[in-house]
Image (cartoon, grey):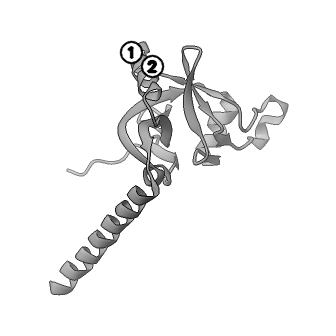
Amino acid sequence: MKKHSDPNSKLIAENRQARYHYAVEDTLEAGIMLYGSEVKSLRTGQTNIAESYASVEDGELWLINSYIAAYMQAGHFGHEERRKRKLLVSKRELSRLWNATQREGMTIVPLKMYFNDKGIAKLLVGIAKGKKQADKRETEAKRDWNRQKQRLLKQNQ
């Protein structure tokens, strides 16, 4: 029997360049503290997390430089478009993230923002290490080879 996808569950924004620039070692789902006008704006899909990053400051995890467009119907009860937003994780996960960022070259990168099946906004963050130019070329070469391999297999059928 085919499962029907939940109408509340949908992808809001994706950081497609993150996997190109970083080698993601581990992922973690975090909640986001948002204002009502931000949630309304997210439902219209007016957001960007490509230039954002997460950091641990004063024992809390923050999403920095993410863009959520102003919701016009909110009037003067709106929000700042590029404010710091608190991410909600457990203490154990926060300490794990803190330890990972203290290692050399590790950073916390937002990968996807989405509504889960209950309609709550979530952010998938990755603990990642920056790739060097040679690593990026190697990844690109593997991707090109896989594409070429698929073409050859399709022609032979």
x, y percentage for residue 102? 46, 25
Image vertical order of residue 89 relative to residue 124, above or below: above
Mark 2–mark 1 Cα distance, whole angstroms, equals 5 Å
**Residue hosting label 2:** 94
Judged left or right of residue 149, residue 109 is: right
> In the rendered view of the protein, which quadrant contains the C terminus?
bottom left
x, y percentage for residue 78? 77, 32
x, y percentage for residue 22? 44, 47
Please report the residue visible at 58 percent of the width from the left and 44 percent of the height from the top: 49
Judged left or right of residue 144, residue 76 is: right
x, y percentage for residue 73? 77, 40
Image vertical order of residue 84 relative to residue 133, above or below: above
Which residue is nearer to you in this view: 42 or 125?
125
Q: Which mark is residue 92?
A: 1
Q: Name which residue type carries label 1.
A: Arg
Please report the residue visible at 67 percent of the width from the left and 42 percent of the height from the top: 67
Q: Badge 2: how crowded within 10 Å, few (<14), some, or many (20+)?
A: some
Which residue is nearer to you in this view: 113 or 65?
65
Q: Name which residue type carries label 2.
A: Leu
Image vertical order of residue 61 relative to residue 109, above or below: above
Which residue is nearer to you in this view: 60 or 72?
60
CB contact under 8 Å: marks 2 and 1: yes
Secondary structure beneath label 1:
helix
Q: Badge 1: how crowded within 10 Å, few (<14), some, or many (20+)?
A: few
Q: Which mark is residue 20?
A: none
Please report the residue visible at 47 percent of the width from the left and 28 percent of the height from the top: 101
Which residue is nearer to you in this view: 109 or 67?
109
Judged left or right of residue 120, residue 49 is: right
Secondary structure beneath label 2:
helix
